[in-house]
Image (spheres, rainbow, N blue to C red):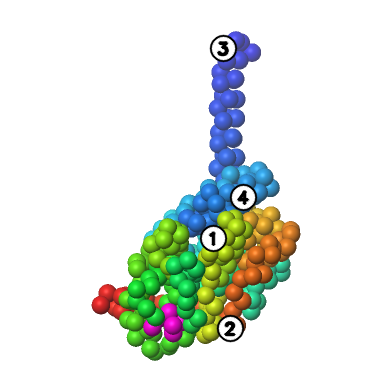
Amino acid sequence: MRPYDLIKFALLSSTIALCMVGTASAEGKLTVYTYESFTAEWGPGPKVKEAFEKQCACAVDFVAVADGVALLNRLKLEGASTKADIVLGLDTNLTFEAQKTGLFAPHGIDVSAINIPGGFKDDIFVPYDYGYFAVVYDTEKLKDAPSSLKQLIEGDPKQKIVIEDPRTSTPGLGLVLWIKSVYGDKSGEAWSKLKGRVLTVTPGWSEAYGLFTKGEAPMVLSYTTSPAYHLISEKTERYKAAAFEEGHYLQVEVAAQTPNGTKNPLSAEFLKFITSTAFQDAIPENNWMYPAAKTSTPLDPAFDTLVKPTKTLALNPEEVATNRKVWIDEWLEAMSK
């Protein structure tokens, strides 16, 4: 082979090699849509990313929006053109509606390791954690915390609460469903009474909890597990969850793959990874929720001190899907008066 042929051959070989590397890189990438607090520096996202990338020798690309409801809204807007392989952060209040969009595909994995209250069986969605909505309060600013939804709704309007928007946030939607499950047809009246205690409505949980910890309000809509963060990370008992006599509304967070994800073998691998201790270990002290499967070590004793609901409240996902818009409109009408 002549010298210039050798040069041409070398250049051609280099080009082919680069193309192959580019193809491998594209195939070795998993795009996960989720919510902001999951991907935050203190959230479980960084640990999940590190552990899965080590397992799969691939790259995980998190794309975050404000909160869980916003995830479904974004996916609906993108439709079949979505770049998402995995959507992580919907909850069981949205699964029926999400399934009906046709934008999610069966997972085809063994989920026998999953163990959540009431059980869970679904061929599309894989639970990764669960928790109970609660009013978290600052003991230094509120001496007499409400012990029921009734007391929260009818209490002193000077003692404010920060809540999340049900149009974008799963906790915000959770409060709508919590009140609906207790007050039924009188939910509109309950919201009209509660309005005077609401300092502001935020797009997602992160903004709401941030305002609360900055001292803007003595109460915030969060979870029974939220005080565990302050106990473990800050060594303080200042923040507590109020136990409500009517019970607490259950949230189960789930992940699923899109039809786009079915073309990427990493999607099924990631959904299976969710059920492993490598993923679940990141949940209790980063997402501050209960793990949906076993962790490699027992939970910190702080979790034993948390509010244990005397009654678990949960509406059927199909009922939620059928009525979500009407119930949110009811909320909007009451809050706008």
- Per the image, the residue denoted by label 2 is 311
Question: Which numbered tag is attached to residue 4?
Answer: 3
Residue at 55% in and 51% down = 42
Asked whether disc 3 touches disc 2, contact meaning CB atoms under 8 Å apart, the reply is no
Q: CA distance from mark 3 to mark 4?
A: 51 Å
The quarter in which the N terminus is drawn is top right
Q: Earlier in the sequence, mark 2 or mark 4?
A: 4
Report whether residue 198 is seen: yes
Q: Earlier in the sequence, mark 3 or mark 4?
A: 3
Hey, what amino acid is under mark 1? Leu
- Per the image, the residue denoted by label 4 is 47
Q: Position of residue 308 (x, y in %)?
A: 61, 76
Asked whether disc 1 touches disc 3, contact meaning CB atoms under 8 Å apart, the reply is no
Crowding near the residue tagged with mark 4, few <14, some 14–19, many ≥20 C-alpha atoms within 10 Å = some
Hey, what amino acid is under mark 4? Lys
Crowding near the residue tagged with mark 1, few <14, some 14–19, many ≥20 C-alpha atoms within 10 Å = many
Residue farthest to the right? 297
Q: Is residue 108 magenta?
A: no
- Per the image, the residue denoted by label 1 is 88
